[in-house]
Amino acid sequence: MSFSVTEPTKGTKWFAGLLVITYAIITLVPLLWIIATGFKSPTDSIAYPPVVLFEPTLEGYVNLFTDRTRATDDMLEAAGPPETWYDEIARSRGTIISGPSRYGERFLNSVIIGFGSTFLCMVLGTAAAYAFSRFRVPLKDDLLFFILSTRMMPPIAVAIPIFLMFRNLGLNDTHLGMILLYTAVNLSLSVWLLKGFIDEIPMEYEEAALIDGYTRFQAFYKVVLPQAATGIASTAIFCLIFAWNEYAFAVLLTSGTAQTAPPFIPNIIGVNGKDWPAVAAGATIFLVPVMVFTVLLRKHLLRGITFGAVRK
Amino acid sequence: MTSSPIQKAAQVTPDGVARKIRGLSDRTIAWIFVAPTIFLLLAVNIFPLIWTIRLSFTNFRVNRPNNAVEWVGLRNYERILNDPDIWNTMQATAHFLLWTIALQVIIGFFLAFLINKKFKGNDMWTTIIVFPMMLSPAVVGNFWTFLYQPQIGLFNYVIAFFTGVDPASFSMIGDVHLAPWAIIIADTWMWTPFVMLICLAGLRSIPDSIYEAAECDRASKWRQFWTITIPMALPFLMLAVLFRGIENFKMFDLVVQLTGGGPGNTTTLTSIDLKREAFEKWRTGYSSAYAVILFVTVFGLASIYVKALNKVKER
């Protein structure tokens, strides 16, 4: 083994590791608490002192996905024996399931709007990034800065005219409207990130393709795109996560048909007021996919969050 | 003009085919590729911004579309700048900005410094630490209200456990003095990893050879830290501050779910105040002027800051 003066000693490493792991565990507690609360019964969820070991139940998840009405003993008897396991959980609380809740719809809206805007954003963003990377576009730097500066505006500041504009166009509370809006919000990110990725692909490949008789379009499509695949994929995940998490526009511009999950989850109420296990269950289902994506993205995280300003 | 057979052939070739043979000019392709993006940004960002500026000179109210819209000149701006409530809001925002940035820079840099010691498994732990910042601030913020509940909340329980005070005796989001700290704690929990990642990149960009040279010169570790590590990581730190500054100036989702701006107006940050004016009181003209002032402030501060950042980078 070679000796290096800059290599930290074993003791230093051990100590640094200990501190970092301690921080990581502390920072994880709120997240683990969300997941755990989703499996608690209402009594356990508000117990004092807070309980760490408890008997897990799916009541929170049942409450999340169903609407229930309080029932008297007579009504419970008249309804006959419970037919399914979720019926049984609801009955044990003296309630009858009256139908599915709106959570499924809201979650689906998040999926539709998230993927729709990501797709559109990638199509537009890749094309623009390619042009900015390879061609002499007049006023290039100004345009690039303009694209970035659209991110500096507080969403609330532009929400009023967008609200008015969407109302005139009939886009308020529609999937299409939200997809277009989120696409515009994410475009700055995708153009800047993708330009960085495309800049890294040597120009020689395309030149060779052009000499071989490819048109520009073919060279873009058959040479550049495959090489930028990882960059495009990680940019897409970033756009997806941003659209998925967005709250300000969603709460101001949607209420019924196109409402996404973030404005919905905090307002989940049970029969007896705020139903924390159901809220936690809804949050868990909503947050866990993002954590999985974060693990997939780990190599490009830094680039994504700094708009490509910092590359590793 | 006499024409060669080639030119003749070119003349009779239909335009479409000719273009296929020649291919579009690079300039045309560039415009085809860039135009949709610029168009969408103009439609969804710039057009509304111009509209906001126009509305800011009127007394228009969205909820009373039938009222005559009057041109009021700069009156909205005058009223905002003379409104003591706005200055309270600005103060709350400044307090929030200052403390979140300070805490996140200190903790984030320290964490990055430790992670850069390259202990076993540091990659995995870095990814775990990053989780909070990738999640939906609204959903997480809402759950923090649960952690902050007096008596039953986990946060209060932990504080009580370590300090011995009664967990029911204080309410992080109900108390005028504690609420500003409640949002600072939640924001710091969420965004410290962001600063950490950028600092880590900064630390990793410092070549080993510089430390080796310093070691040969018998510079102490402490001196190395202040004369090598800090100055070389400074541009990255400043970049992190820029990003966090802009983001937290716009802060809405996390705080609106946590405290809703209360109690009183103690955590009413500018975005929350703006939302109230625009979507609860429906003073559209007034809130448009407010939005313009905010935008000019962010843009102005960011430009000055970027200039300073570039100077540091040049050194």
Image: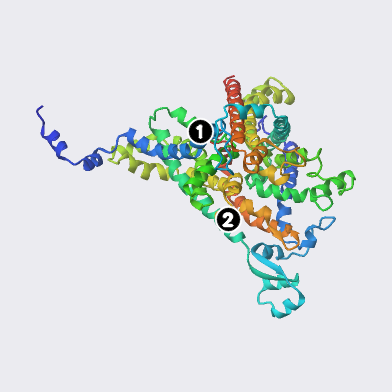
Calculate the distance from the C-alpha at mark 2 to the C-alpha at mark 1: 29 Å
What SS does tag 1 mark?
A: helix
From the viewer's side, name the closer residue of A119 and A17: A119
Do we see residue A233 in this rendering? Answer: no
Q: Quadrant of residue A204?
A: top left
Quarter assignment of residue B28: top left
Residue depicted at x 89% and y 47% = B166
On the rendered structure, is B159 left or right of A309? right
Q: Is residue A98 above or below residue B153?
A: below
Labels 2 and 1 in the same subunit: no
Q: Which residue is mark 1?
A: B50
At which x and y percent is residue A95?
Answer: 72, 70
Q: Which mark is residue A248?
A: none
**Foreground residue among B113 and B82:** B82
Residue A8 as seen in the image, left or right of residue A52: left
- Where disc 2 sits, the SS reads loop
Q: Residues within 10 Å of mark 1 (few under 14, many from 20)?
A: some
Q: Quadrant of the N terminus of chain A?
A: top right
User: What chain does mark 1 sit on?
Assistant: B
Compared with B164, A85 (above or below) is: below
Q: Residue at x 64, y 40 (%)?
A: B275
The quadrant in which residue B55 appears is top right
Q: Is residue A44 above or below residue B31?
A: below
Q: Amino acid at mark 2?
A: Gly
Q: Which residue is mark 2?
A: A256
